[in-house]
Amino acid sequence: MGEVVDGERESGRDRLGRTLKDLREKAGKSLGQLADETGYDKSYLSRLESGQRLSKVAVMEDLDAYYGTGDLLVRLWRDARKDVIKDKYKGFMELEATARVMWLFQLRVPGLLQTEDYARAVLSGLSGAQTTAGNGEEVEEQVALRMGRQELLYRDPAPNVRVILDEGALRRPVPNAKVWADQLSHLLEAAELPNVVLQVLPFTAGGHDLMDSHLSLFWQRTGDPVAYVEGNGFGEVVDHPDKVLSFRLSYDLVRDAALTPVESTAFIKRLLEECRA
């Protein structure tokens, strides 16, 4: 539970910032000293303490090690990131964070499998033609949030994840060729994880029920599956059993039409070779 400050409940981001400041002051360090000893920019550390900026989770891991606080800052970061999640994604993020099994059909490379540079390029594009001082901070926060989500792929126990990528997701590179090549390489690396299955749905599969939306199906440790459907400008959690069953049947048809995991890996390797040529 957050503390009540001036009649309002303290946000997760503010609580993290206050804890960072308290730890630094108890250690008898100035911001300048902390910057020198950790290698992080002084103004950046100041914005973290004031709650103006959400860091990457790796920064909290470094500071936990620096202060000897176990995983305190990482745990506070996980709570603070909820302040950054846009409302329409909150239900999705809650399901994703606790799911034991995830089946995804995606029209673009999903956040769980994006590299940091690719995520930045995509999010900058969504923010407008140019990343300005005004939206640059927001983009970086969303990148940090997206990268932080990926830790669930490596936790113990890790969820079993099946991702079916529409071929169109692999035919729309970002302008920077290296960023795109690195992203394709990352997909191949992800496909080697024991808990991840990656398939490609080729254009030759023709029309299907999921052509206009992303679909995620989640199974928790107990209970019935829940679906999340996302399209242009909307996202909806669906838990009605009949509707979820309908989505599951649509997913099964898409999976049957997709390339096998081995064929999908070979397909992505060919694209990577073309990109590097």
Image: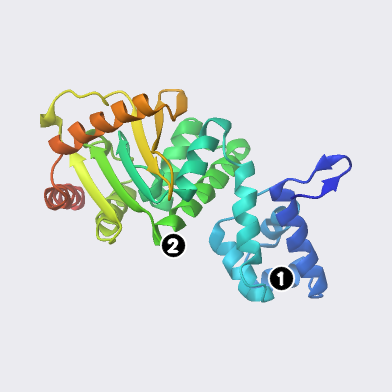
Does 34 appear above or below 205? below
* Quarter occupied by residue 107: top left
Q: Amino acid at mark 1?
A: Leu
Q: Depth check: 116 or 179 in front?
A: 116
Image position, residue 100 (x, y; %): 40, 51
Does 19 appear above or below 232? below
Q: Residue furthest front?
A: 223
Residue at 27% over, 59% down: 189
Query: In the rendered structure, which disc, 1 or 2, sits on the residue that comes first in sequence?
Result: 1
* Residue named by callout 2: 155
Q: Is 242 positioned to the left or the right of 29 in the image?
A: left
Which mark identifies residue 34? Answer: 1
Q: Residues within 10 Å of mark 1 (few under 14, many from 20)?
A: some
Image position, residue 35 (x, y; %): 68, 68
Q: Amino acid at mark 2?
A: Arg
Residue 39 appears in view? no
What SS does tag 2 mark? loop
Does 227 appear above or below 189? above
Q: Is 24 positioned to the left or the right of 85 in the image?
A: right
Residue at 29% over, 40% down: 173
Separation of marks 1 and 2 at Cα, in angstroms: 30 Å
Q: Depth check: 275 or 188 in front?
A: 188
What SS does tag 1 mark? helix
Q: Residues within 10 Å of mark 2 (few under 14, many from 20)?
A: few
